[in-house]
Image (spheres, rainbow, N blue to C red):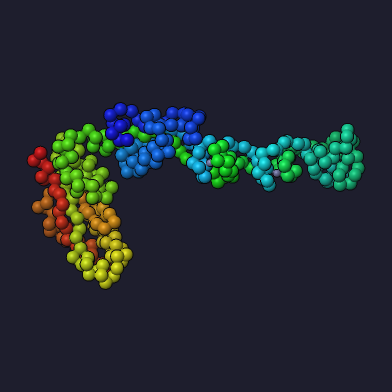
């Protein structure tokens, strides 16, 4: 999809299409639903940027967007409603639809059986209500309901799924990656990059693509000397929460100069504006301070995976 958008130079654009169950289609992509899912996943990872196109209602049963909306009887959900006048009989306070009073041409009160003769004197008409042709109930506030035209599923208006339709364009990050010659991808080892958590990948790509000045940055992995012992004695969940505590402490100490990124089983630090030689003593003291408050010691050290200095050779 990214390559297609890059080559075509077009955005992924929805066009209205009433005969599709989604009421729209993406130009060049025949399967609308899987295109939506892929585009959403790419947008979540920062490769595509969304712009709002429209808001649809979606069937929870079959994902169709072909729903009709109608006013319904709140008691039985029938849309067979008609508006009727209410009559208020002053002398006995009976309030009912006009039909209940109607006897041929005369109006007779169903409660006290008196005939109503003078509008304004015997009775008045305080308003109109909806009368349900199916269950015969009246209501002044009809409900809203949606019915799927593809599978017939009905849902209350306040419970219906809403789904936003977007057009998508390549993000700067995706454009930069796709425009890059292979040589420049090799500048940062691709296999290494792919092992990183998403956010770290994004940061490294941005740094690697600033062409004018080769940026100084270092990516290091935190290694834990006590890893095997802790896994054996405390278990994986405990080890992971210790890693998390240490990572949070470390990020707090490093401030804006570096960022800590964690994947399921590894932690990385991206240092900005430094080279490898300047890092050693500084990072060791930061790691020591990060774990000083922890009950169990992790014995962390840094393994430098990549240093921006090599990049200046290119
Ligand atoms: Zn009456
Ligand atoms: Zn009804
Ligand atoms: Zn449906």
Task: Report the quarter where the N terminus lies.
Answer: top left
The quarter holding residue 30 reads top left
Expressed as whole percent of the image width and height from the top left, the position of residue 132 reads 72, 41
Task: Report the quarter where the C terminus lies.
Answer: top left
How many marks are shown on the rendered structure?
Answer: 0
Please say whether residue 141 is visible from this viewpoint: no
43 up-or-down from 225: above or below: above
Residue at the spot x=84%, y=36% of the render?
120
Residue lying at the far right in this picture: please name it.
114
Expressed as whole percent of the image width and height from the top left, the position of residue 312 reads 10, 41
Query: Closest to the observer: 34 or 80?
Result: 34
Query: Closest to the observer: 188 or 274?
Result: 188
Image position of 79 (left or right of 59): right
Expressed as whole percent of the image width and height from the top left, the position of residue 300 reads 19, 62
Residue at the spot x=11%, y=45% of the render?
309
Expressed as whole percent of the image width and height from the top left, the position of residue 154 reads 59, 43
Image position of 144 (left or right of 254): right
Residue at the spot x=47%, y=40% of the render?
163
Image position of 182 (left or right of 13): left
Residue at the spot x=70%, y=38% of the render?
81
């Amino acid at each position: 999809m990214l390559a297609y958008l890059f080559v075509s130079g077009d955005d992924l654009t929805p066009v209205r299409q009433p005969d599709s169950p989604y009421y729209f289609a993406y130009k060049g992509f025949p399967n609308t639903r899987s295109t939506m899912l892929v585009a959403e996943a790419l947008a979540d990872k920062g490769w595509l940027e969304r712009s709002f196109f429209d808001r649809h209602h979606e069937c929870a049963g079959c994902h169709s967007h072909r729903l009709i909306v109608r006013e319904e009887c709140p008691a039985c959900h029938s849309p067979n409603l008609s508006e009727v006048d209410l009559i208020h009989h002053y002398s006995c306070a009976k309030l009912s639809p006009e039909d209940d009073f109607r006897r041929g041409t005369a109006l007779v009160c169903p409660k006290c059986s008196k005939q109503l003769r003078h509008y304004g004197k015997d009775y008045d008409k305080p308003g109109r209500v909806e009368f349900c042709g199916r269950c015969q109930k009246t209501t002044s506030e009809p409900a809203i309901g949606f019915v799927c035209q593809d599978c017939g599923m009905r849902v209350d208006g306040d419970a219906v799924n809403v789904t936003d339709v977007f057009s998508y364009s390549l993000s700067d990050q995706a454009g930069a990656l796709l425009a890059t010659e292979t040589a420049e991808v090799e500048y940062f080892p691709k296999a290494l990059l792919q092992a990183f958590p998403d956010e770290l990948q994004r940061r490294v790509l941005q740094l690697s693509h600033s062409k004018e000045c080769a940026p100084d940055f270092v990516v290091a992995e935190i290694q834990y000397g006590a890893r095997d012992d802790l896994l054996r004695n405390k278990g994986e969940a405990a080890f992971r929460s210790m890693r998390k505590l240490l990572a949070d402490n470390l990020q707090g100490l490093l401030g804006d100069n570096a960022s800590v990124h964690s994947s399921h089983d590894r932690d990385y630090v991206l240092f900005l504006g430094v080279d490898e030689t300047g890092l050693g003593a500084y990072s060791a003291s930061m790691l020591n301070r990060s774990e000083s408050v922890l009950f169990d010691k992790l014995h962390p050290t840094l393994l430098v995976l990549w240093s921006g200095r090599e990049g200046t050779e290119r």
